[in-house]
Image: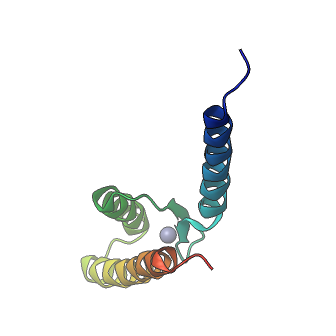
């Protein structure tokens, strides 16, 4: 059986889709000031968990609760700002 036009079109679409995913992947992450990379995911809860988990790792290096609080706030702002920046780029028309 030879492939129908439908199958060929579908394969083309799938290839396009993969290409787009790969391209998006390259800038779909946020980077902490320490150099740690957090992958952007469409699920905001997961994103928040990933950021929280990473920030808690910073806390391990600091014993002063006051400093930990300030540092935590600073890092949240830094990382959340990047999430919104990336989200804004994503929603722009692809031209
Ligand atoms: Zn970090």
Give the left or right position of residue 14, taking residue 2 as reference: left
Residue 29 against residue 69 in the figure, above or below: above
Residue 8 against residue 38 in the figure, above or below: above
In the rendered image, residue 87, in percent from the top left (x then y), is placed at 44, 75
In the rendered image, residue 16, in percent from the top left (x then y), is placed at 66, 52
> Closer to the camera, 61 or 9?
9
Q: What residue is rendered at 41% in x and 83% in y?
A: 81
Q: What residue is rendered at 60% in x and 51% in y?
A: 17
In the rendered image, residue 45, in percent from the top left (x then y), is placed at 28, 59
> Closer to the camera, 71 or 51?
51
Q: For residue 10, what is the image quadrant?
A: top right
> Closer to the camera, 50 or 6?
6
Q: For residue 41, what is the image quadrant?
A: bottom left
Give the left or right position of residue 84, taking residue 12 as reference: left
Give the left or right position of residue 50, taking residue 32 as reference: left
Give the left or right position of residue 95, taking residue 73 as reference: right
In the rendered image, residue 56, in percent from the top left (x then y), is placed at 35, 63
Q: Quadrant of the C terminus?
A: bottom right
């Amino acid at each position: 059986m030879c492939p129908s036009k439908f199958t060929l079109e579908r394969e083309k679409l799938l290839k396009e889709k993969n290409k787009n995913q790969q391209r998006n992947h390259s800038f779909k992450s946020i980077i902490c000031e320490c150099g740690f990379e957090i992958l952007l995911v469409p699920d905001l809860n997961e994103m928040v968990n990933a950021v929280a988990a990473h920030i808690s790792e910073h806390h391990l290096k600091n014993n002063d609760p006051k400093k930990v609080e300030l540092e935590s706030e600073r890092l949240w702002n830094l990382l959340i700002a990047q999430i919104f920046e990336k989200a804004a780029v994503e929603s722009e028309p692809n031209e």
